[in-house]
Image (cartoon, helix red, strand yellow):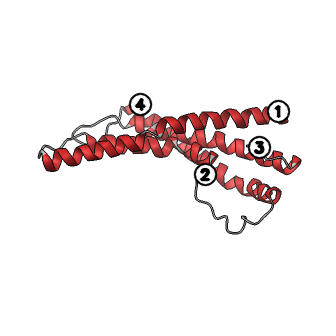
């Protein structure tokens, strides 16, 4: 059973790492597009109608799809002032107890995010701008990102159980 948990932890970590690497180019694209818009607007006096909309969508992809990667690398904000001096096993026990809040929030995001994305997809919703790109693709990142975080949260939960039971930290 422990080997299956380790395989799951490693597989989810690889998935979120791969997604994190793919979306890591998005800040460069957003920066380039912003600079392009500034140049078009102030140098050429020909502002675009699409750059701002595309930047919003790229930023949504970055934030929503990067959650699992951020959780994997412990990059989310946490109040660890009280736990930073605890031994690893006690910290794992506390994480297991408080994980109910994480799982509750992620399940709400997954369920309601899926409904929002599905409704948007069915309606073929577009942004209310002149360019009017599809909005449903951006909204679909809500349940996908929540699923990636849920998978990573389960992996962390398993790693905490392994640490608590065996004293072995799973990378």
Q: Are marks 1 and 3 in contact (CB under 8 Å)?
A: no
Q: Residue at x 62, y 48 (%)?
A: 73
Measure how far apart labels 2 and 3 are at the Cα level.
25 Å
Residue labelled with disc 4: 122
Depth check: give the residue in front, 124 or 11.
Answer: 11
Give the number of the disc on residue 152: none
Q: Residue at x 77, y 49 (%)?
A: 160
Mark 1 or mark 3, whichever is nearer to me: 3
Give the number of the disc on residue 105: 2
Is disc 1 placed on a helix, strand or loop?
A: helix
Measure how far apart labels 3 and 4 are at the Cα level.
42 Å
- Name the image quarter holding the C terminus: top right
Residue labelled with disc 1: 3
Q: Residue 77, position in %: x, y?
A: 58, 59
Q: Residues within 10 Å of mark 2 (few under 14, many from 20)?
A: few
Mark 3 or mark 4, whichever is nearer to me: 3
The reply, left or right, for residue 135 in relation to residue 49 is right
The mark that comes first in sequence, 2 or 1, is 1
Report how many numbered discs are placed on residues in the image.
4
The mark that comes first in sequence, 4 or 1, is 1
Q: Residue at x 63, y 52 (%)?
A: 74
Residue labelled with disc 3: 170
């Amino acid at each position: 059973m422990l080997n299956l948990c380790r395989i799951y932890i490693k597989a989810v970590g690889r998935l979120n790492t791969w997604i994190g690497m793919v979306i890591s180019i998005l800040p460069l694209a957003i920066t380039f597009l912003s600079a392009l818009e500034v140049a078009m607007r102030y140098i050429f006096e020909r502002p675009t109608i699409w750059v701002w909309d595309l930047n919003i969508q790229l930023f949504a992809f970055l934030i929503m799809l990067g959650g699992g990667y951020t959780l994997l690398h412990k990059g989310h904000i946490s109040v660890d002032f009280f736990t930073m001096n605890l031994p690893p096993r006690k910290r794992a026990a506390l994480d297991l107890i408080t994980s109910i809040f994480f799982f509750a929030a992620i399940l709400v995001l997954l369920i309601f995010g899926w409904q929002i994305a599905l409704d948007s997809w069915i309606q073929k919703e577009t942004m209310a701008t002149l360019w009017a790109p599809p909005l449903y693709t951006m909204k679909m990142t809500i349940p996908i990102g929540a699923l990636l975080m849920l998978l990573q949260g389960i992996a962390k939960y398993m790693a905490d159980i392994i640490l608590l039971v065996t004293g072995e930290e799973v990378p």
